[in-house]
Image (cartoon, rainbow, N blue to C red):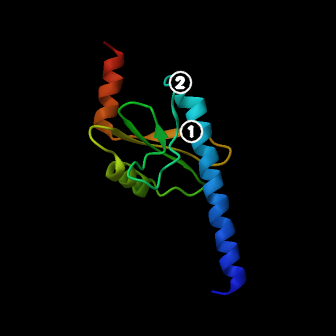
Amino acid sequence: MNDHSQRHNTAVTAASRRKGARGELEFIQRHLQPYWPEAGRNLDQFGADKRDCVRVGGVHWQIKRTERLDLWGALAQAEREATGADLPIVAFRRNRSRWFCAIEAEPLVGLLAWRDL
């Protein structure tokens, strides 16, 4: 790899990280803070705690802001990195799209049934 290619890959990686950080902040502010006012970005995602969002009791959020999401890989990452009884959820969107969440069916159906009680 020549010097120009290395600089280009580094710039793309840095731009991708910035886009991801903006996506995390956007999702947290728009969708989580109305219910968990103390929710915030995990600024130490390289430590033992890999979740993207902190102070959202019982949920392990993986937040993806990308045009081409490997959904199965993101789900596996969320499940692998969730600790204890935390529910792994992947929130994702691409440009000019709404936010969506992927969650295992069993807990989702349980949450929906709980609404009818």
Answer left or right for 23 relative to 89: right
Residue 98 in view here: no
Compute the Cα span from label 1 to label 2: 19 Å
Q: Residue at x 61, y 57 (%)?
A: 17
Badge 1 amino acid: Trp
Residue 55 numbered mark, or none:
none
In the image, residue 113 sits, relative to residue 43, either above or below, namely above
Answer left or right for 110 relative to 12: left
| Quadrant in the picture for the C terminus | top left
Residue 37 numbered mark, or none:
2
Q: Residue at x 49, y 49 (%)?
A: 44
Outermost residue toward the top? 117
Please identify the quarter of the rendering in which residue 76 is found.
Answer: bottom left
In the image, residue 108 sits, relative to residue 70, either above or below, namely above
Q: Nearer the viewer, mark 1 or mark 2?
A: 2
> Which residue is disc 1 drawn over?
99
Along the viewing direction, whichever of 98 and 75 lies nearer the viewer: 75
In the image, residue 45 sits, relative to residue 85, either above or below, namely below
Secondary structure, mark 2, is loop
Residue 100 in view here: yes
Residue 54 location, x and y as percent? 46, 37
Badge 2 amino acid: Pro
Residue 28 location, x and y as percent? 56, 35
Residue 24 location, x and y as percent? 57, 43
Secondary structure, mark 1, is loop
Q: Residue at x 38, y 36 (%)?
A: 59
| Quadrant in the picture for the N terminus | bottom right
- Tell me, yes or no, whether the two marked residues, 1 and 2, touch with CB atoms within 8 Å: no
Along the viewing direction, whichever of 60 and 108 lies nearer the viewer: 60
